[in-house]
Amino acid sequence: MTSWIVNNAATVVICIALFALLALIIRTMVKNRKSGKSNCGCGCSSCAMSGSCHGNTKK
C-alpha cells in the first residue's frame, strides 16, 4: 500500500487539492445562498425567474 502511494504521490496530491477546491466552491455557494446572494453573477431585478429562484427575497 505504501509503495502504491509513493509511486502515485503526484496524482494523490492533485486529487486532494481538487477535492479541497471543490469543497471550498460548494461551501461558498451554500454560504451565498443562505445570505440571499445570487450565484449567477447578475442582478435579480430584471430576471423573469427571480420569483422561483429566490422566493424569500424582496423585490
Image (cartoon, rainbow, N blue to C red):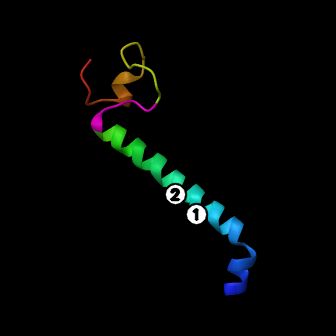
Which residue, given by chain and number where applicable, does mark 2 sit on? 20
Identify the residue at image location x=28%, y=36%.
Answer: 35
Three-letter amino acid code at the position of disc 1? Ile
Q: Label 1's element?
A: helix
Residue closer to the observer: 23 or 6? 6
- Quadrant in which the C terminus is drawn: top left
**Residue range (magenta):** 35-39
Q: Assess disc 2: are there few (<14), some (14-19) or many (≥20) residues with their C-alpha within 10 Å of its C-alpha.
A: few
Image x and y of residue 30, in percent: 37, 45
Identify the residue at image location x=45%, y=21%.
Answer: 42
**Residue 1 visible:** no
* Main SS category, magenta section: loop
Residue closer to the observer: 5 or 43? 5
Q: Are marks 2 and 1 in contact (CB under 8 Å)?
A: yes
Q: Which mark is residue 29?
A: none
Instruction: Please identify the quarter of the rendering in which residue 10 is found.
Output: bottom right
Check the image and report above or below for 9 versus 24. Answer: below
Which residue, given by chain and number where applicable, does mark 1 sit on? 16
Q: Is residue 36 magenta?
A: yes
Image x and y of residue 21, in percent: 53, 52
Residue closer to the observer: 52 or 25? 25
Q: Label 2's element?
A: helix
Three-letter amino acid code at the position of disc 2? Ala
Q: Is residue 52 magenta?
A: no
**Residue 7 visible:** yes
Q: Is residue 39 left or right of residue 35?
A: right
Identify the residue at image location x=39%, y=30%.
Answer: 38
